[in-house]
Image (spheres, grey):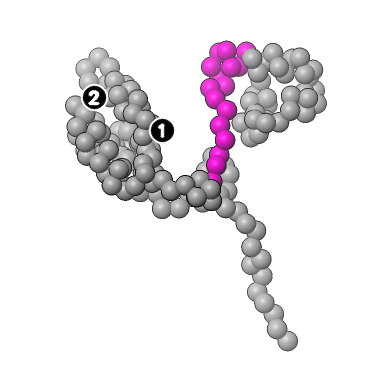
Amino acid sequence: MRELLELIEHDARRPVSEMAVMLKKSEYEIENEIKRLEKNKIILSYNTLIDWEKFGSDTVTAIIEINLTPQREVGFDAIAERIYRFDEVRTVYLMSGSFDLLVIIEGKSLKDVANFVATRLSTIEGVTATRSHFMLKPYKKDGIIIGDEEADRRLVVSP
């Protein structure tokens, strides 16, 4: 039920009664479908997007490109698993192109992130190179515009 998944993905707090009306189904059918999707791990989690900067919390987010030597029998999976188990790691993707893994991490400071890369990531057997990119300012995340305060951009016209 793709339509239901799209509704939940866009707004997980939307009431079941509203989704039932929109999808022309009963609330009972929608509730059962959601339970089935959760049980089958199609719905993995419900997330909230928070503007931490506006809240006053300072963290550093970095994107780390990692080159690997694949391991016999398991390829990149064993190294990726070792990396995604670190608490600092938010996201890990296997990539095509000039690097193998894209890792997004968060730390309290630039020094914390640099230390994590130097002492924990780059020392893993099979990691041949890392390149770090620090995120300076988010404009849009997961389809949501961050800090979208509709400014009046009209030119002032004077007589």
Residue 46 shows in the view: yes
Q: Nearer the viewer, residue 114 or 100?
A: 114
Tell me the quarter of the picture where residue 9 sits. top right
Q: Is residue 27 left or right of residue 81?
A: right
Q: Is residue 4 above or below residue 59?
A: above
Overall secondary structure of the magenta stretch? loop
Q: Is residue 122 left or right of residue 139?
A: left
Residue 118: % across, % down: 22, 39
Q: Which residues are magenta?
A: 36-51
Report the amino acid beneath label 2: Pro
Report the amino acid beneath label 1: Thr
User: Around disc 1, counting alpha carbons within 10 Å, would you say few (fewer than 14), some (14 to 19), or many (20 or more)?
Assistant: few
Q: Is residue 39 magenta?
A: yes
Which residue corresponds to the image point at 53% horizontal and 48% vertical from the top-left? 55
Q: Is residue 58 left or right of residue 68?
A: right
* Residue carrying label 2: 70
Residue 48: % across, % down: 57, 35
Tell me the quarter of the picture where residue 62 sits. top left
Secondary-structure class at tag 2: loop
For the C terminus, the image quarter is: bottom right
* Residue carrying label 1: 91
